Image (cartoon, rainbow, N blue to C red):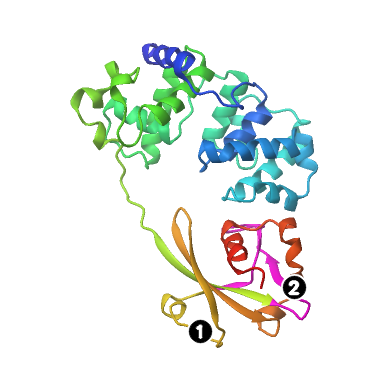
Amino acid sequence: MSQIGNQVVAWQISEGRRMPWRDTHDPYRIWIAEIILQQTRIEQGEPYFHRFMGRFPDVHTLASANQDEVLKYWEGLGYYSRARNLHAAAKQLVGSFGGIFPNTPETLMTLKGIGPYTSRAIASFAFGYPAGVLDGNVLRIVSRVMGSFSPIDKASTRNEFQLLVDSWAAKVDSRAFNQGMMDLGATRCTPTQPACLVCPLQGVCVAARDGIVHLLPAKSTKLVRKERYFDFYLLTNSAGEIAIRQRSESGFWGGLWELPNTETTEASWKEGKTPDGQEVKMRLKHVFTHFDMHIRVVRSDQTSALGQEPDIQYIDPAKIPIFAFSKAVHKIFDRALPL
């Protein structure tokens, strides 16, 4: 098993990718990068990393910030629970740990939003903790190297693979090993058209030997996408101000600001007018991981029932940049403003 670990480390040293959060052992910078890169491509996440670090350079600055401002700096990245959890964990670190990061996965997992993968990544990259990290790239590599058809979406498989990766990382530089595994998954052992001929693990890979790389990894279930339909209201008052409201922290877009909206049925959404007779201004689609949101934008005034709700506030359109909105709402603003 140390053979695989040594091969990955040697490859990482010569061929691994260079990134701004890899030239440090600072657990704060590593933590911020790891959270940003969850569900986010590196090329998309890197500008956000620099912007976020510029405003919140250390855990004390982040902990003392207002949550609305944290969400504003996260605006556009999606999965906003990540930003809320970062803020909450920063407060935990300052309040319970004196601003000092724990150096073991077990203690790191007591922080809000830090699970098995992130805790091991921080422990390894910042403190050299001898453990492997398991993400989608690593699951794919292990599945192919071992020629395993165990479904990677099952907890039993993940537990089995975690023990295996831990054994590969045990007697080598875990930081270089884990970075190497991620880079191999991103540049060599890719989901489609893997570059087996230039992969350092080709000689020990069962899938490459048996010609079954294209069949792995295996999954037990296939994601079925849902379609959801919404009416978003562009409500204005006599001063030309726009109605907005803040979402609760649960669910998608938690804590962000939005236009008033209601969920409706597909049949109703396809009509030219809303049930209360309002004209439809435009339609657009926004894609989430697990469902597609179909949006019908309705232009109205504050006499609408929605415009009278207690959580509604009206703002000058010039103040839109002050608030954190989702990409979907920004799409509406871009196409509908000025009114």
- Quarter of the figure with residue 157: top left
Viewer-side residue, 176 vs 240: 240
- Quarter of the figure with residue 226: bottom left
- Quarter of the figure with residue 189: top left
Q: Quadrant of the N terminus?
A: top left
Q: Which residue in the protein does label 1 denote?
A: 273
From mark 1 to mark 2, how far is it between C-alphas? 23 Å
Q: Secondary structure at mark 2?
A: loop
Q: Is residue 180 magenta?
A: no
Q: How many marks?
A: 2
Instruction: Name the chief secondary structure element in magenta.
Output: loop
Viewer-side residue, 68 vs 323: 323
Residue 268 image position (x, y, % from top left)? 45, 80
What's the residue type where badge 1 is placed? Lys
Q: Which residue in the protein does label 2 denote?
A: 241
Give the residue displayed 19% in from the left and 26% down from the top. Answer: 210
Q: Is residue 244 magenta?
A: yes
Question: In the rendered view, does 48 fall on the left or right side of 182?
Answer: right
Question: In the rendered view, does 192 fall on the left or right side of 134?
Answer: left
Looking at this view, name the residue that lies furthest to the front: 338
N-term mark: 1 or 2? 2
What's the residue type where badge 2 is placed? Glu
Give the residue displayed 41% in from the left and 32% down from the top. Answer: 137
Q: Secondary structure at mark 1?
A: loop
Q: Quadrant of the C terminus?
A: bottom right
Looking at this view, name the residue that lies furthest to the bottom: 277
Q: Is residue 312 visible?
A: no
Magenta region, residue range: 236-262
Q: Is residue 30 visible?
A: yes
Residue 202 image position (x, y, % from top left)? 29, 19
